Amino acid sequence: MPNPEVLKWLRTQFFPHMWCPGCGHGVILHAMLRAFVDLDMKPEETVIASGIGCSSRMPGYINACTVHSTHGRSLAYATGIKMARPELTVVDVMGDGDCSAIGGNHFIHACRRNIDITAIVMNNNIYGMTGGQASPTTPHGAIATTAPYGVIDSSFDLCRLAEGAGATFIARSTIANPKQCEKLIVDGIKHKGFSVIEIISSCHTQFGRRNKFRTPIDNLNRIKDASVPFAKAQGMSKEELAGKYVTGEFVNIQSPEYTEQYSRLVDRLKGGSR
């Protein structure tokens, strides 16, 4: 039987969901809801924001304060909400293209500000909803509708991008390890600052069928076989890590949080000090 505490977080009236059967995003949704239960969060004090794409339909199924915004701009909306109501827990769910292509500028500046938002990036290496175009994370050589002979661009490592931009909590997991997803989401929400949790997901409809992984199980096994724990990766060469997903917690540091700095600035100016 489903956990009744998890069910409280679902808008069951909107089911069945719109994702393809076997889509990895369902695993991520369940991990998120279990994390909310673990943290004893309250729906009325929780905001889930999203942009456009398969991943961005997720807030519609969550019983919380939700914002389905525009493509690539969800972090701008989430930032405004956090600045207006810093006491709220704000979680932003994004796809890989939504985050790092049209939303790339918002992403790097949210990292730079270190605002207390948890960004969950569902990376299925493709634009799933809009037709299977290559995204900034599509692997070199993979087939997409915009790259019928294979992608020649180098792909982003989203976690390294976030680290370079200044995020203070960065981690990666995969749909092949839902318990780790849950733990990292818990840790990211608890962290005071901008948290990035990349979760490697799958799209057998748009990515898999063009790249010889036609079924959900094919894709799950592909991801599982390519996963390498962070500790093990430290002893592997660059060649050995090619095509692998290094998983675990990469960055967890303390740094001044943006809304707190802003509040102190307002208090100082109210006191007449400049």
Image (cartoon, rainbow, N blue to C red):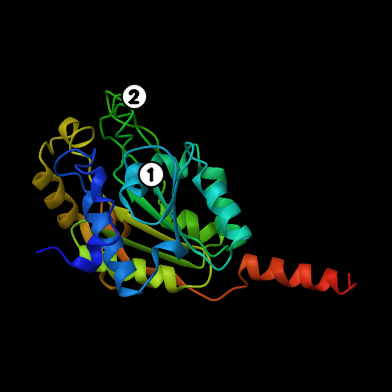
Amino acid type assigned to the residue bearing label 2 in the image: Thr
| Label 1 – label 2 distance at C-alpha | 16 Å
Residue position for label 2: 146
Q: At 82% from the left edge and 73% from the top edge, which residue is drawn?
A: 268
Q: How many marks?
A: 2
Q: Is residue 54 left or right of residue 80?
A: left
Residue 132: percent from left, percent from top: 29, 29
Residue nearest the observer in this picture, 185 or 223: 185
Mark 2 lies on a secondary structure that is loop
User: Where 65 sits versus 185, above or below?
Assistant: above
Residue position for label 1: 96
Q: Is residue 191 left or right of residue 223?
A: right
Q: Quadrant of the C terminus?
A: bottom right
Q: Quadrant of the N terminus?
A: bottom left
Residue 271: percent from left, percent from top: 86, 75
Q: At 55% from the left edge and 68% from the top edge, which residue is drawn?
A: 87
Mark 1 lies on a secondary structure that is helix
Question: Mark 1 packing: few (<14 Cα in 10 Å), some, or many (20+)?
Answer: many
Can the viewer see residue 180 in this picture? yes
